[in-house]
Image (cartoon, rainbow, N blue to C red):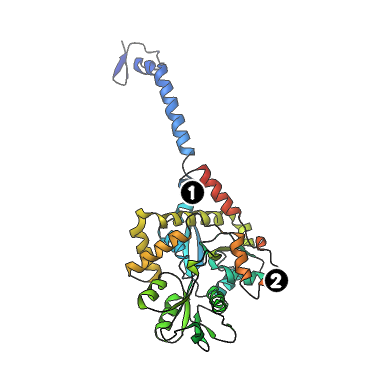
Amino acid sequence: MKRWRCSNVFSDNPKSKTCPEQSRRIQNPKLMRSCALLIAALAILFFQLPAPLHAQSKPLREIKVGYPLGGSSSYFWVAYRSGSFEKHGLKLEPIYIRGGLMGIQAALSGDLPLQLQGASTVVAAWAQGAKEFQFIGAVGNRLDYVLVAHPSIKRPEDLKGKRIGVSQLGSSTDFIARVALRRLGLNSEKDVQIVGVGGQGDRWTALTTGQIQASVFQSPFTLKARKAGYPTFVDFSKEDFEYTVAGPVTTKSFIRAERETVMNFMRGLADGMDFYRDDRNKDRVIKYLGEYYRSNNTEELEETRRVYSQVTPGLPIVTAKAMENVIANDKNLAGMKLNVNELLDLSFLEQLAQERKSKPR
């Protein structure tokens, strides 16, 4: 008699399509239920995977993003270096912007439709007709600048006739320096000469070599000034002054064309800010800040991380009040009856908050 071999089991029934062991397995209800439950569990697990994991099957969206060199903007650099944007499908090419006006021009030309920018520069451009701009968040909602003077300046009135350095005329540092001078009873148009020098490092060099007699600084240069014994005449960081220092800015046309790209940028920025503040990442953050500031002074870098972890403790939130203060403290903007809500698009922050609420971290 011919015997049918199947899985090392022999059957004497040639008409049988299955071997006895297979038949027993197929008819085993417990085994069938277990298989069904396993398949269902795998399916649920797949559909519950975070969106970034699904996105990895797609090519990363390459995009250039402009940024300045400033304290709160270091959040962006850490987010970039920590890989937070890649997790949300973006491959960024950071482009350093020396001054706010250069960023405005690059945005309007379409070269850099997504940037980290100082609020005052964007508000001024928007008020003058550049209605394309939209602020979608902020990496700092408290003014944290300090007006530092050369040791030769003993009193605020000694600044009369002297040179005050800012990054670029018309930039946020220009605006903030003028606010500080008004606090000291000085007229920025008549009493001093405001000159464009460059970023904080350039301004610090100009101050220490006597090329300028005062400037405004953020951490870590505030620590440099304290250690060097340079006089401080205005310290906004000690005030609870709600003010949008800098934040992500884009255009209405870019939002219409690539809304999901903008949303993914905000997701990556928020994740990067969490990474920045997490003490478990301290060593890596200090390393990235060293790259950002081109510094290996650990004390100054740790000071920067400490300060900005406190200044912006949560999501990159921008508020109407902070933007209104930008306008109220600019003599050219204060009388224009501007509605800041037209400059803000809070939908990305609202979606980000909702996503985090539904998927607690």
Residue 346, percent across and down? 60, 55
Task: Name the residue that disc number 1 marks.
Answer: 55
Q: Earlier in the sequence, mark 1 or mark 2?
A: 1
Residue 351 located left or right of residue 311 = right
Return the residue at label 2.
336
Q: Amino acid at mark 1?
A: Ala
Vertical side of 278 occupied by 128: above or below: below
Q: Amino acid at mark 2?
A: Met
Contact flag, marks 1 and 2 (Cβ < 8 Å): no
| Image disc number at residue 217 | none
Foreground pick, 275 / 133: 275
Where is residue 170 shown, x and y percent of the image? 58, 77
State which quadrant residue 232 falls in: bottom left
Can you give x and y, in whole percent of width and height, for residue 119 in the image?
57, 68
Up-down relation of residue 303 to residue 61 (above or below): below
Q: Quadrant of residue 278?
A: bottom left
Tag 1, which secondary structure?
helix
- Mark 2 secondary-structure assignment: helix
| 62 or 187: nearer the viewer | 187
Position of residue 46 relative to residue 94, above or below, is above
Relative placement, left or right, of 82 versus 65 is left
Which mark lies nearer to you, 1 or 2? 2
